[in-house]
Amino acid sequence: MCSAWTTPTVRRRVWAWVSPRDGKRITTWETRGRTLTLADGREVRLRRILRLTERTIKADGTVPLFPEVVIDGWETTLTEPIDTVITLYQDHGTHEQFHSEFKSDLDLERLPSGKFNTHTLVLGLAAVAYNILRLIGQQALLGKEALLRHPAKRRRLKTVMQEMLRVAAQLTLHARCMALNFFWHRIAECGIIIALFASLDGQAESCRGGVTESGAR
């Protein structure tokens, strides 16, 4: 730290800038990080990876009065290239969203028993349910009939259960064919639900013409 009357000396270096779009440029570099002392007495020198992002034009086209400068940093013992390290570390904060879905949406905040064998069974079944709901959400998100309120990369499990599973419908079996009758405001999602039935059972694809817009009884 320098006093107010002293000008710090900065080593000149060549900055390699990358511009992913107009008004935004990124540069990365590496410095020596901290030295950690392990339990066995060994010392490990960390790498400090830094990334500087400068935005003179925002993604929506807005031009700010002053450039927006953001610096991100990571300390690691990995020996991979800088771009690989940043890719591995930059989205770690988003992992808490998946923890929240597993605990809150699947109601696993507290396990029902004090026995580890029971916990193993419950968590195994929860993993199966999680994967099925995630599959339904991704197929609904990527389908042409999907109605999106805003751009998204995935649906939360709670949203899948509310909008895809809790749907009033009438199941009709006629002439060796299975038909689902939905309310009129759900007809846009019929293709998605039929596709899910077809992928899981293999029988509903032939019944696509049996889906009507009548209300469920």
Image: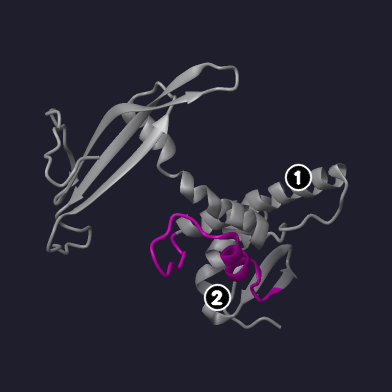
Crowding at label 2, few (<14), some or many (≥20) Cα neighbours within 10 Å?
A: some
Relative side of 174 to 192, left or right: right
Q: Which mark is residue 186?
A: 2
Residue 121 lies in quadrant: top right
Say which of 174 and 40 sits in front: 40
Check disc 1 and give the amino acid type: Gly
Check disc 2 and give the amino acid type: Arg
Q: Does the magenta run of residues contain 160?
A: yes
Disc 1 from disc 2: Cα separation: 33 Å
Crowding at label 1, few (<14), some or many (≥20) Cα neighbours within 10 Å?
A: few
Relative side of 199 to 37, left or right: right
Determine the secondary structure under disc 2: helix
Residue 90 seen: yes
Residue 116 lies in quadrant: top right
135 to 52, vertically: above or below: below
Mark 1 / mark 2, whichever is N-terminal = 1
Determine the residue positioned at 62% across, 51% down. Answer: 199
Determine the residue positioned at 73% across, 66% down. Answer: 175
Relative side of 55 to 39, left or right: left
Range covered by the magenta-colored residues: 144-170
